[in-house]
Image (cartoon, grey):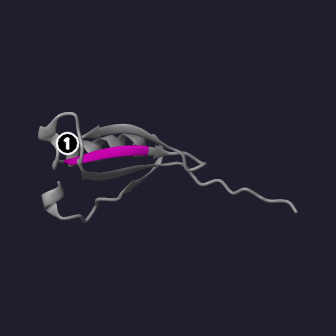
């Protein structure tokens, strides 16, 4: 039997979460944003991270301007997260 492998189109994704553990205790409980590049195989590479949703959106837009499909998983999230 032959298996045909379909590749996914690469994309960049903006996501975020609350810091649970950190070497600096003052960071625990803060919301942190990150952008990952996801390749054809589904492997992920962190390409940006920081405390600002707006800066995360700008980082994501740079990928979009270079022709990469982008996904904002936080779009529509409560404003308190931004």
Q: Residue furthest top?
A: 23
Q: Out of 64 and 10, give the one closest to the viewer.
A: 10
Residue 2's spot in the image, x, y percent? 85, 60
Q: Which residue is mark 1?
A: 51
Q: How many marks are shown on the rendered structure?
A: 1
Instruction: Please report the residue visible at 13 percent of the width from the left and 59 percent of the height from the top.
Output: 80
Residue 26's spot in the image, x, y percent? 11, 39
Q: Is residue 71 left or right of residue 29?
A: right
Instruction: Please determine whether, in this image, residue 22 is positioned above or below residue 11.
Output: above
Quadrant occupied by the N terminus: bottom right
The boundaries of the magenta stretch are 31-36
User: SS of the residue at dot 1?
Assistant: loop
Instruction: Please report the residue visible at 23 percent of the width from the left and 49 percent of the height from the top.
Output: 20
Q: Out of 72 and 62, give the one closest to the viewer.
A: 72
Q: Is residue 32 left or right of residue 66?
A: left
Q: Is residue 73 magenta?
A: no
What secondary structure is the magenta-colored segment mainly? strand
Instruction: Please report the residue visible at 32 percent of the width from the left and 40 percent of the height from the top.
Output: 59
Quadrant occupied by the C terminus: bottom left
Q: Is residue 35 magenta?
A: yes
Q: Could you classify mark 1 by the number of other residues whose Cα lies within 10 Å: few (under 14), some (14-19), or many (20 or more)?
A: some
Q: Out of 3 and 6, give the one closest to the viewer.
A: 3
Residue 44's spot in the image, x, y percent? 48, 44
Residue 78's spot in the image, x, y percent? 18, 64
């Amino acid at each position: 039997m032959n298996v045909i492998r379909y590749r996914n189109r690469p994309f960049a994704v903006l996501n975020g979460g609350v810091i649970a553990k950190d070497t600096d205790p003052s960071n625990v409980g803060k919301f942190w944003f990150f952008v990952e590049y996801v390749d054809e195989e589904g492997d992920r590479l962190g390409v940006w991270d920081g405390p600002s949703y707006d800066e995360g959106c700008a980082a994501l837009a740079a990928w979009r301007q270079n022709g990469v499909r982008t996904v904002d998983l936080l779009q529509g999230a409560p404003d308190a997260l931004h």
